[in-house]
Each structure stands twice: as C-alpha cells, then as structure tokens.
Image (cartoon, rainbow, N blue to C red):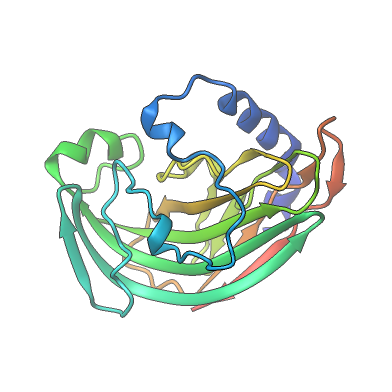
Amino acid sequence: MKKLWTLLSLTLILTACQAQASAPKDAAEEEKETVSEPSANKQSTNDIYVPNPQITDDRELLEVGQTFKDDKGAAELKAIKKVNETYQVGDVELMIHDVKIIEHTPAYSMIDFFHSFTHEETFNIVKVNIEVKNTSDQPVFFSPLAVLETNTGEHKDWESDIYLEELNGELAANGSKRGNIGFILDHSDKEIKSIKILTSDLLNQEQQIEEKAQEINIKF
C-alpha cells in the first residue's frame, strides 16, 4: 500500500484533469458545472440530483437488500455507510455523504459503455457521494478521490471512475461541486468491510502544492 501511494504522482493527476476540463462541453456536461453556494434553506442531495447518463439511480437505496430498476439497469444495495463527515484539505472542504456497495446489472443499451471497464454482466460498484467546496477567493486544483483501496486488496484510481461527473480538476474560487465517484470491483464475491481513500495534493493556480494529500479511512 505504501509503495502504491509513493508511486502515485498526484500532480500529474491534476494536470491531466485540467486538460480534460479544457475540452469542449456538450449540453449534458454543462448541467454538471460548479454549483453556487447553498442558500439559507439548504437543498438536499435529492433536490439537486442530476441523473447519470449510464448508471442506475440509487438514491432510494438506503437499506441493505433494497432494489431499484430503471431504463439503465437494475441495482441492489449490498452495503451502506452514512458518513456525513467533512475533511479539510487546505482551503478545500471535502464532505463525504455516504459510501455504498451496489450490485449492478446494466440494461442492454448500456453494455457497450461498461465493456471498457468489465465484461461481467453483473458486478459490484463501490460508490462515494461527495461534495467539495473551495473556501478561498482563488481557484485551486484538487481530486477528492485520487486512489481507493478496499480491505480485500483492490486498488482503483481516478482513471477507473465510471460516473464521470467531473469532480476532479479545477475548483473555482468560492465554488463547489457535488456528485458521485465510483469503481467496478474486480472481486464481487468478497465482502468489503472498509475502504481507504487518498485525495490528491491541493494545488494553486501556479500548479504548486498548497496542501499535501489526505488519507481517509471508512469502515462499513
């Protein structure tokens, strides 16, 4: 594990994210742009939900064993941890709302998308629902989940994210983003009891490190 963290170039992660962020955006991507600061009547995650174009909606899955089906596929909740904790990384607040393990069976129309990640017809996803806020008046570069490790020994990095909700990269001055980051597990038969998250370093406008990466441990 220590060797993995050492080999990971967090600065390169954010440089790649910045390049992706500069690419043209279509109408669907525009919907996922940075949201403004919440008002006094703070909205819930459900109130600002933007449907993912590839993955089944799991908002109603709150107890283990619950299932949900839509035109993107079928999902069953295998495990859930309601974290609701805020972690400070320099001027950025990282809020982890919950972590879920979801058994997902994509609809036929979605199979091509998932084939770039797995050839299994049914698989487990580890999904983290987060929000990041930049409390400074200068833009920063940050990846809330650069690497994830499970207690079973699986390692996933930001490039394996299947939600693609643009939560990595530039974070505008006093801006925020909210959404999901998730990974397909290679061994769905193994029970996930805990995960370890490593954020990226926090970089300023000059791509200089303002704050070192933070490690976060979550147990189910």
Query: How many numbered marks does the figure carry?
Result: 0
Would residue 145 appear left or right of 180 to someone viewing this image? right
Which of the 4 image quadrants contains residue 206? Answer: top right
Rendered residue at 65%/46% (across/down): 143
In the rendered image, the residue lying farthest to the front is 40
Which of the 4 image quadrants contains residue 130? Answer: bottom right
> Residue 194: x percent and y percent?
53, 73
Quadrant of the image for the N terminus?
A: bottom right
In the rendered image, the residue lying farthest to the top is 24
Would residue 67 appear left or right of 184 to someone viewing this image? left
Question: Which of the pair 35/109 is nearer the observer?
Answer: 35
> Residue 31: x percent and y percent?
42, 38
Q: Is residue 24 above or below residue 126?
A: above
Rendered residue at 33%/62% (across/down): 188
Would residue 36 appear left or right of 71 to someone viewing this image? right
Rendered residue at 80%/44% (across/down): 137
Question: Which of the pair 107/26 is nearer the observer?
Answer: 26
Rendered residue at 44%/71% (across/down): 192
Q: Is residue 35 above or below residue 190?
A: above
Question: Which of the pair 124/67 is nearer the observer?
Answer: 67
Question: Which of the pair 19/27 is nearer the observer?
Answer: 27
> Residue 55: x percent and y percent?
29, 49
